[in-house]
Image (spheres, rainbow, N blue to C red):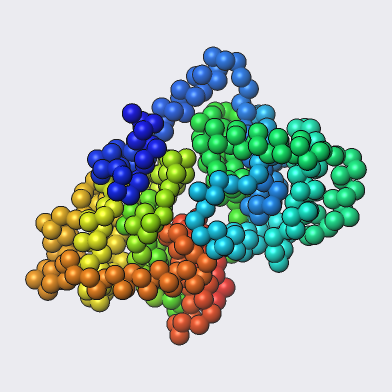
Amino acid sequence: MIKKVLRNFLAKRTIGSKLRNYSMNTFSSYDLFKKIRIDAEAKRDLENRPHEVIYFHKVDDPYSHLTIQYIDKIKASYGVVLKPILVGDENPETIHEPNLYNAYCLEDSKRIAPYYGIDFKPTSYPKKELVDLSNAILTSVEEDKFSEVAKEVSNALWQGDEDTLSSLSKVYSSTEKEVSEKLASGNSIRNAKGYYFGSAFYYEKELYWGVDRIDHLEDRLSELGLKKDTNNEPICAPILNSPPSLESDKQVNLYYYPSLNSPYTYASAKRVGEMRDDYPINLVTKPVLPMLMRNMKIIDLKAKYIISDAAREARKHGYPMGSIYSPIGKPARKAYSLFPIVDEAGKGFEYIDELLKASFYDGINIGEDEYLESLVERLELDWSIIKKDLNTKKWKRVLDDNLKDMYAGNCWGVPSFKITDLDGADPFYVWGQDRMWLLKEEINRRLA
């Protein structure tokens, strides 16, 4: 039953709301999260296996260039066996808008690298022949030397340093067949562990993607008593310049692109409100349709990871998920229909925030007229005026325009953000609740 539900997870039109809600509540459950950890450790103990952390490395993935820098630090700081797995291309079903995706990933990695003390300044993705050469080198490298050689390979690859790669290939060489088999094996292992990209870590039923999730891995290993020293400082955290709060005579615009069915949007909402309180911003809320209502599909591996990871992130930021009622379809359309008039009344962000809490914490169907009326009244607005827009279609143009604006910054998923000067100039786009710290850095850079 669980497998069938997961296979159809969130599928538009092919799964009823009850099954969709069941899936989302299952994989966001903190009780299930804890049970999986306990059972996984018990099974590992019973089988007398070491604490093994698996790392998936993809040579032409810019995020893998960042994560490979931390392999030795993890091994030095924790009593674990670290097993590197070389992987190849992603399942194309997991990547929406591939042109935007590739451009954004490279730009994002370049932006965040300096905050981690990493020199990473490529102007484009590496040439295929250099990618093939890099995979051939790493295919023949033994596990105990992988991190050392992989870092050297990654530096050379992203700098276009063919001489260094050619020199390494004289020591580590593989046939085309060996490389193909290695990558296929790596992809198979990655898929079996429930993931679909490179630059990710795996430990006993749980995945940790990129430098953004190494903190969760560290927390888990520390809870197991695997820390080798008493140093409580994280081994992987960006070095930030922005203060907790900022005062300035100037302001910037912060555009927020949420969707009502996005668990990551829910995980971001509390911090968006706090940023408005702590930073001199003019917050402009620009909702967009959920991806599933934009005819995008989410395969089972990705669906499970998204909801479980978003729940983990929400707990981390003090905004845990509770009972979930997905608003996909009619509930979302009804709620969106009121957004333009509510926003004109100055309550756009508060309205979206309350809808997200209803869907991801209180388990409320936000498409019920009674709920929408009570929400509007809690926002101290006049229902007799607001309800005139209920079920009208003017909201569609608004959300379409918001989506076009979001896409202009190579962003296709939510939550996305844009910072501009008050006159709308100098746009700075970021995608994801993972980059809210980068928003503060950009605001601080402009105003401090």
Residue 144 falls left or right of residue 239:
right
Residue 75: x %, y % from top left? 69, 35
* Quarter of image, res 52: top right
On screen, residue 355 versus residue 377, left or right, reads: right
Residue 164 position in % (x across, y down): 87, 52
Q: Residue at x 34, y 35 (%)?
A: 5
Q: Is residue 34 left or right of residue 167?
A: left
Residue at figure coordinates x 13%, y 58% from the top left: 369
- Compared to residue 305, the image places residue 2 above or below, namely above
Q: Residue furthest front?
A: 177
Q: Between residues 155 and 437, which one lies in front from this camera angle?
A: 155
Q: In this orientation, does residue 279 appear?
A: no
Badge count: 0
Residue projecting furthest to the bottom: 423
Q: Is residue 339 left or right of residue 410?
A: left
Please state which of residues 425 and 92 is positioned toward the viewer in this rendering: 92
The x and y percentages for residue 375 are 18, 60
Eyeballing the image, is 373 above or below 445? above
Please name the residue shown 33% across and 53% down the image.
261
Q: How far from the left and from the top, in percent, is residue 70? A: 68, 44
Name the residue at the left extreme.
384
One can see residue 398 in this view: yes
Picture residue at 65% right of the left edge, 37% below the top:
184
**Which quadrant holds residue 414?**
bottom left
Of 17 and 425, the residue lying toward us: 17
Above or below: residue 397 compared with residue 327: below
Quarter of the picture holding the C terminus: bottom right
Q: Quadrant of the N terminus?
A: top left
